[in-house]
Image (cartoon, rainbow, N blue to C red):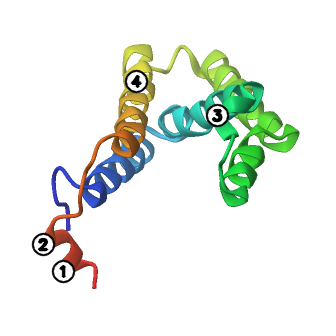
Amino acid sequence: MYVPNTRIGATYHYTCHMHHAFDSYGEVHALAALLPCPWLYLEIFQEMLARKEYLKGTQQIYIDFVNSYADETFQAYGHEMIQLLDDLVTKHQDELDMDLLLQQFMYSSAEELRFWQMTLLPEKWDSFTTAQSK
């Protein structure tokens, strides 16, 4: 059940957006909707590793998490996704509504921003959501 203004609601909303992109518009739009997540993680965690002070005093589990997204394997995966989208857009550019494709990407980017904001804002699980998840 979608519960607005909660973490579950945000997750549900973002997931529905990605499913809608694929179901309604196909693989190129789905990739555009999926790409902001790994691309953002790649950029953020590379920057965190470059600035070692971000990880000072951090528990090892979080350092390992950051390292997993900044390692060469994940970097290659992220760059492959970017290249795949570029290739698909080039191949199908006559068939694609580029404004809609950009909208898919930008919408997902905004959803990613909401997730990162949740870590900074003192949000709490509401009692209805907590009761529903039990």
The numbered mark at residue 78 is: none
The answer for how far apart the CA atoms under marks 1 and 2 are is 5 Å
Q: Give x and y (percent) for residue 25.
A: 41, 37
Question: For the residue marked with disc 1, what is the amino acid?
Answer: Ala
Dot 1: element? helix
Disc 1 to disc 4, C-alpha distance: 33 Å
Query: Which element carries disc 2, helix, strand or loop?
Result: helix
Instruction: Tell me which amino acid carries mark 2.
Output: Phe
Instruction: Give the x, y percent position of residue 83.
Output: 73, 25
- The amino acid sitting under disc 4 is Met
For disc 2, the marked residue is 128
Residue that mark 1 sits on: 131
Frontmost residue, 106 versus 24: 106
Q: Tell me if 6 is positioned left or right of 72 in this view.
A: left
Quick check: marks 1 and 2 in contact, CB under 8 Å?
A: yes
- Give the distance between the C-alpha atoms of the residues marked 3 and 1, in whole angstroms: 36 Å
Return the residue at label 3: 54
Q: Mark 3 near mark 2, Cβ–Cβ under 8 Å? A: no
Using a 10 Å C-alpha cutoff, classify the residue at mark 1 as few (fewer than 14 neighbours), some (14 to 19) or many (20 or more): few
Which quadrant is home to the C terminus? bottom left
What is the three-letter code of the residue carrying label 3?
Tyr
Which element is circle 3 on?
A: helix
